[in-house]
């Protein structure tokens, strides 16, 4: 790797974006009080996959992979809870 | 790392799940002909973030990170196109 510091910055920016992406979706469901068009299967697969990504991050010692996937997992789980509530 | 092979398997399983997660969402929009409850900001942030994850994968030489994020990016982009079409 040419510059591990640059890789870490890009990883953190990537993780920041993919993690933050769930926030407008959570807010939209809360505002519209509707999650009809949301696929619960998407978010169930996501939560399972994000948990495995966090484990992978531990195994390859990648801090951006670990922290961003744990936060993403919590937000994706929130979408599932809201889907159950608003249908 | 204790066993790089195990880490790769977990990374591929993680990537398989998070990538495949977009498929039921794409199918649901096509079936319902509606994407009203989908946040376009979620998927715009996702596409940008997934692109950066792929770059990060190149920098840390992680094949699971590269391939799964490129496929995810294409599926997330499909959700944006369908959102534009069905609103």
Image (cartoon, coloured by chain):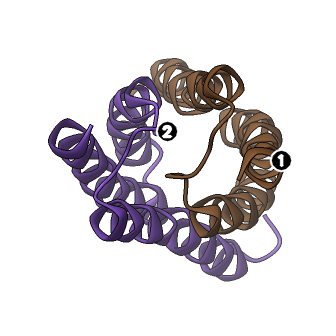
Chain colours: A brown, B purple
> Could you tell me which chain the residue with mark 1 belongs to?
A
Asked if the residues shown at circle 2 and circle 1 are in contact, with their CB atoms under 8 angstroms apart, the answer is no
Residue B38: % across, % down: 46, 39
Please give the name of the residue rendered at 55% of the width and 61% of the height, measured from the top-left corner.
A39
Left or right of A83 in this view: B25: left
The image quadrant where one finds the C terminus of chain B is top left
- According to the image, label 1 marks what residue? A85
Left or right of B65 in this view: A16: right
Residue B18 lies in quadrant: bottom right
Left or right of B29 in this view: B64: right
Please give the name of the residue rendered at 54% of the width and 28% of the height, measured from the top-left corner.
A21
Tell me, yes or no, if residue B11 can be seen here. Answer: yes
Label 2: state its secondary structure: loop
> Could you tell me which chain the residue with mark 2 belongs to?
B
For label 2, the crowd category at 10 Å Cα-Cα, with few meaning under 14, some 14 to 19 and many 20 or more, is some
The image quadrant where one finds the N terminus of chain B is bottom right
Please give the name of the residue rendered at 70% of the width and 53% of the height, measured from the top-left corner.
A87
Q: Nearer the viewer, residue B51 or A20?
A: A20
For label 1, the crowd category at 10 Å Cα-Cα, with few meaning under 14, some 14 to 19 and many 20 or more, is few
> Distance between the Cα atoms at labels 2 and 1?
14 Å
* Placement of B63 over or under A68, stated as above or below: below
Residue A18: % across, % down: 53, 33
Label 1: state its secondary structure: helix
């Amino acid at each position: 790797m040419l510059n591990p510091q640059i890789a870490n910055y890009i990883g953190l920016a990537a993780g920041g974006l993919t993690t933050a992406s769930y926030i407008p979706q959570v807010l939209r469901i809360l505002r519209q009080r509707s999650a009809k068009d949301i696929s619960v299967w998407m978010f169930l697969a996501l939560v399972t996959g994000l948990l495995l990504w966090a484990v992978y991050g531990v195994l390859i010692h990648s801090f951006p992979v670990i922290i961003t996937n744990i936060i993403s997992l919590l937000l994706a789980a929130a979408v599932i809870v809201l889907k159950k509530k608003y249908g």
